[in-house]
Each structure stands twice: as structure tokens, then as C-alpha cells.
Image: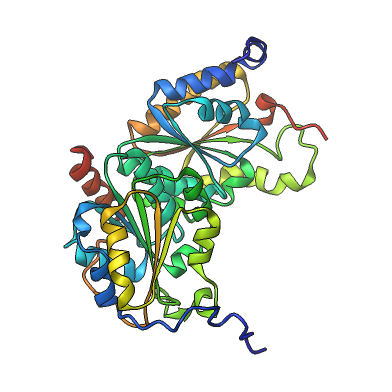
Amino acid sequence: MAGDEHDLEPWQHALYDQLRDAGVTQFAYVPDAGHRILIDRSIADPDVHSVALTTEEEGVAMLAGADLGGARGVLLMQSSGAGNCPNMLSMTVGGRFPFLTLISMRGDFGEGNPWQFPMGQATQRVLEAMGLIVMRIDRPEDVRPVVAAALTMAFQSGFAIAVLLGQRLIGAKKF
Amino acid sequence: MARPTRMQTNGHPPPVLDRREAVPALIERPRDFLVVAGLAGAAQELTAITEDSPLNFPLGGAMGAAVTMALGLALAQPKRRVLCVTGDGELLMNLGSLATVAAMNPPNLTIVCVDNCRYGETGNQETHTGMGVRLDVIAEGSGIPVVFTVNTADDLPEGRRLVSEGGGLAFILLRVKEGPALRTKRRFEPSRVRDRFRAALLGVE
């Protein structure tokens, strides 16, 4: 990793290390600027499977399969992708599969694209309606403790957890 | 308006095989695999021919999940062979999963699609394969390295060889007539099926 980038965005790098330290070996994602560092590091990491999806719901099913095989995975997606997942989450919640997704928010703090608001504003309620526990991070110093809590709740207690990374944390896209 | 007829056969001969014979003939040793089975007929059949193996996960919902669920399992268990058996309707719900799995190219995964041109779970309505859509061509175009279509009993030995020998990611389209699947009592409680699978494979729930 370039030192400059590390200095500019330390929490994303620490977050990747935290996920790896917790035994996460499958990273499923639909490409997104908000998750760029996590995705790039998973691609560069020879000890994990970095899986590009065509739609986010594939990742929900994939992580259930990972759990059947004794592996831990995480789904990286944008808030718009959360809208593609509800029916697939029937298996996660009904099957009591552990599940962790990190969601980079759009349609949130400082959003400049009006198309992003309906799904972004509905994301938390949609996931909660499907039975997920949703936590939100808006400050860099909260990333580590909230993700630590989420990892325990997902992989020790077996619940389905979504962590929303707010636009106040990741920065609103400039148009 | 009448449906266009242009695509109705699209190069495929009419299906002649009875799935109740063709599925067990294609998958000779189902208990050699970790299995993910799609909805309806596939879930019934794999429960029947594995004699309700704990290492079979039959879906009762979450349509479109089978292929990527099998992908996650195959990546997690590189030393085991994973078999995904699903139907045309279940696969059509998530055609992108063929692109996702092809890009990963897991060498230990075999996908069998039992294509009866029908949505068996919901009342046997026609699917797009009955309107001419070719899943074997889509699988090939997605980049799956081995794609084979079983149209008649003459094709079964080669299909059987591909399933039993493995040796790389493969997609086998098994074309069957409309008609009943092998029936058995399915386990519908997904958390129990999950726990049973993990206990049998990993020794933990």
C-alpha cells in the first residue's frame, strides 16, 4: 500500500485488517467507490476470495454457502444494493445464517444526486423489515468498535447485521 | 397478442427424457458431493436420490440463490466437490450468477440445470426456455469452460462422465419433458437444514 494513501484514509485500511483478523476470507461486492480500498485490498490478498457480483442478492446467497462450508464472508455494497436483497435475506434470516454486510451510504448527508434519495433513505427500514440488526457509523473513531460489535453479533451470536457507513464518514460524491 | 414463434425451438430438439429416470442416471453418486438443490423438482429429487443426505441443502425459497450459494460453499471447501442442481426457472431468476461463477471459475463446482421449461413450484407455467431461451448458450457466453447439453439418452454417458469426473467448472443442461419429479418429503425448516449440514461437514453447528 502506498504510504500516502494510508495516511489519508487510515480507517479503511484498519477496517480491512480488522475483518481479516476476524477470519473473514470471502469478500463479495458490487464495485463501489465507497468501498474501493476494501475491494482493492481483497483483490490483492492471496489468502481471500474476492468475488465481483452482478447484483447484491448473489452475495447474500453466497455468504450462506460460505457458512455451510465453515467460512466467514462479508458483503460490501452501496445502499442502493440493499434494495436488491430483501427476498434473498429470507434464507439468511429464516436459516439463522450469520451475515455481515457493510453498506456505503448514498442519498444521505450532503448527497447531490436526487436519484439516490429514495433508496438511501429507505435502506435502514428495508433491512430492519427483513429482520436485520442495523448499526450506523458517521465518525472514523467509531469504525473499529462498531465493526468489532458487528463481527461478534454475526459470527458468534449468529445474527444478520448491517453496518451503514454514512456519507458524513465516507464523504459525499462530488457532482 | 400471440407470442412470437421465432425463438420457440431455437435449434434444440423437443425434450424426450423423463426427469425421474434422467436425473438419477446423470448423477450416479450424489452422496459424493456437497449439494445445493434449487426449488421444486430439483429440491425433491436431490433429497430423494441422496436419501435425505445431511450434506444436501435443498432450497424452499430465495429463488435465484442456488448457483451463488454453491459458489460460496465451493470456495469455502476447495477439497470437496460441490454440485448445484437447479431448474430453469430458478436459474432464470438470476442469470447474472452464471457470470459471477464463471469469473471465479471454481474447479470443484459442477452445475446441473434440469430444464423442463416450467415453473414447477408455482403451477407449471411456461418459462423462457419454453419460449426459446437457451441456458447452455448463456452459460457458454458467461465463460463457463465446460458446457454440455443432454437432449437424449445417447447424451447421458458423457454427461454422467462430466459429473462424476469433475476436473473443472462445468455446466450441464439436462433437458426433460414436462412431468413429475421424484417425490419425497422435503425438510422445509431452513435453520434445521443448515445446522444439520454444518454438523455433518464441520462437526459444529
Q: Is residue A17 above or below residue A25?
A: above
Residue B76 in view: yes
**Residue B31: horizontal and vertical position, in percent?**
19, 55
Image location of residue A156, percent across then percent down: 33, 30
Q: Residue at x 33, y 34 (%)?
A: A157
A159 relative to B29, above or below: above
Q: Position of residue A26 (x, y in %)?
A: 43, 35
Can the viewer see residue B188 in this picture?
no
Nearer-the-camera pick, B133 or A166? B133
Figure label count: 0
Give the side of residue B186 with respect to residue B64, left or right: left
| Occupied quadrant, residue B46 | bottom left
**Coordinates of residue A106 in the picture (x, y in percent):** 69, 38
Between B190 and A138, the one lying in front of the other is B190
Query: Seen from this angle, which residue lies furthest right?
Result: A175
Q: Which residue does the image show at 55% across and 58% down from the upper left?
A: B141
* Residue at point 36%, 50% (across, down): B109
Q: Residue furthest bottom?
A: B2
The scheme the figure's colours follow is: rainbow
Task: From the viewer's perspective, tell me whether residue A153 is left or right of residue B163.
Answer: right
**Depth check: A67 or A130 in front?**
A67
Q: Is residue B182 left or right of residue A145?
A: left
Figure check: A155 above or below A62: above
* Image quadrant where residue B120 sits: bottom left
The N terminus of chain A - image quarter: top right
Q: Quadrant of the C terminus of chain A?
A: top right
